[in-house]
Amino acid sequence: MTLSDILALFFNPEIAAKTSGFLVDGLWMTLLLCLVVIPVGALGGLAVAVLAALNRRWLNVLLVIYVDVFRALPPLVLLVFVYNVPPFAGYRISEFEAVVIAFLLNTSSYYGEIFRAGIESIGRGQWEAARSTGLGWWQTMGWVVLPQAVRNVLPDLVSNTLEVAKLTSIASVIALHELMFAARSAQQLTFNYTPLMLATLIYFVLLWPVVHLLSRLEHRRIAAG
Amino acid sequence: MLAASGMTTESRPILDVRGLRKSFGSTEVLKGIDFRLAPRELAFIIGPSGSGKSTFLRCCNRLEEPSGGSIHVDGTDIMAPGVDINAVRRHIGMVFQSFNLYPHMTALGNVTLALRLAAHIPRAEAVDLGRTALARVGLADKERAYPGELSGGQQQRVAIARALALEPRIVLFDEPTSALDPELVGSVLQVMRDLREAGMTMLVVSHELQFARAAADRVVFMEGGVIVEEGPPAQIFGDPQHARTREFVARIDGHH
Ligand SMILES: Nc1ncnc2c1ncn2[C@@H]1O[C@H](COP(=O)(O)OP(=O)(O)OP(=O)(O)O)[C@@H](O)[C@H]1O
Ligand SMILES: [Mg+2]
């Protein structure tokens, strides 16, 4: 293979021009997925962590089972399962709904553990000070504990969010037309790797700022001790 | 009869504790405490480490759940079933050894949080009350400072202002100066002296003996979960009746 063969196979301007519209459609879907899946997962995780902090025995047993089960299942397996099993029970769900549900189950478990660590990092003194002034449990959680808890685990939250954003590419296995799916389809139609290279570039441009933010947060945490 | 009815209105205790017991698991830490605090009274609690002083204080606003006995605060049975404990706590200020300010809020934010959320006072009015409370502890100019930007003495005064802003019937202090550098203790004691002048009812766990001698109406010596002896400071420090009290006073006096 000559250099020009390689360029034609991986960096082909003609193919790039032809498939870019298709890729941009995929990009929009990836962005939409992130916009839905990240808040849903984070809120689910917050709910798990706050409910765990209530310290009700049976509730905690259920939460531990929930978190452990969905952290043990590979996300890809979970997604295929969520997409393919409900139709047997008479529910037809769209690819998008399947992704949102599978991601809620998977990512809320991880977000939940992060929020839980944050809540546990806040000492008893903060609770006692707030409760002694007449604040209720939920008020103390919302105004005193959570703001500090989130700040304490911010790098972990950002890091997990980065993983979730990358993980949206697995939606391609159930043929949801997001960026990865668009790139693979375009590659198979054109017998050319240029669309994959483009998708790689798009992912990089999209996520690099988040990575940068993350390393700044982590350095700040190291600096703060 | 007349005298009796006069009693109920005029000198009903602010704090009325009877037969208070508290166990952690199988260890009984408070073994029947009887204690009354009159309006405007300042009582000091002293005693060796582990004698139950903090536990006693924390039972008075139910941060610890008593195992037995009764506690009335300003006439309210705080252990009655169905009592609104959050409403009760608004009227019982508490000041902690480690300040426990909210580090993510300014001094004013610390002081106004409960005014807004627990007392449901509108924001503008809460800010006014908060500023007044900060001025009372001499920190009017620090309302925008975060706890991390304040000295220990200033932080403890903000914590006192946080309690005062709610206009408590009584303030409980648990070793308010123990975490402070010696040179910062004075400013906190001065605030407590001012409070006493203003007629606040106070229950103080502390080993600031000089302050106790000068400012306390009554000193209570606790050991092993019971009140061994109580009386005016002159008696407890000068002429204690019990051998245990004598030993303890001699020991801590030696340290100061
Ligand atoms: N949450 C708890 N669980 C179990 N035991 C406890 C708890 N809190 C206090 N205790 C025990 O109760 C006893 C009394 O403790 P408390 O803190 O009231 O003593 P104290 O008089 O305030 O002592 P110090 O002067 O050291 O502050 C101690 O033996 C302590 O270990
Ligand atoms: Mg103590």
Image (cartoon, grey):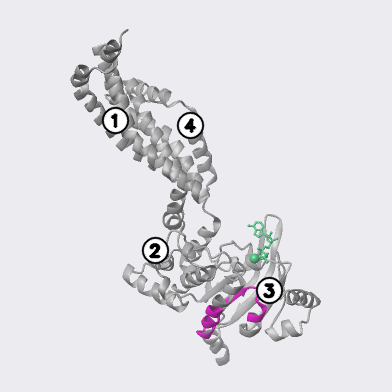
Callout 1 amino acid: Thr
Q: Chain of mark 1?
A: A
- Element on which disc 2 rests: helix
**Ligand 2 is in which quadrant of the figure?**
bottom right
Q: Label 4, on which residue? A: A71
Q: Considering depth in this image, is B155 or A128 the residue closer to the camera?
A: B155
| Vertical order, A6 against A180 (above or below) | above
Question: Around disc 3, counting alpha carbons within 10 Å, would you say few (fewer than 14), some (14 to 19), or many (20 or more)?
Answer: many
Q: Label 1, on which residue? A: A30
- In three-dimensional space, the C-alpha distance between marks 3 and 4, rounded to whole angstroms, equals 52 Å
Q: Chain of mark 2?
A: B
Q: Quadrant location of residue B135?
A: bottom left
Callout 2 amino acid: Leu
Assess mark 3: CB under 8 A from ligand 1?
A: no
- In three-dimensional space, the C-alpha distance between marks 4 and 2, rounded to whole angstroms, equals 37 Å
Q: Which residues are magenta?
A: B190-211
Q: Are marks 1 and 2 on the same chain?
A: no
* Residue furthest out toward the top: A1
Evaluate whether residue A47 shows in this view: no
Frontmost of labels 4 and 1 is 1
- Is B8 in the magenta? no
Residue plotted at (43% across, 45% down): A217
Q: Label 2, on which residue? A: B117
Q: Label 3, on which residue? A: B46
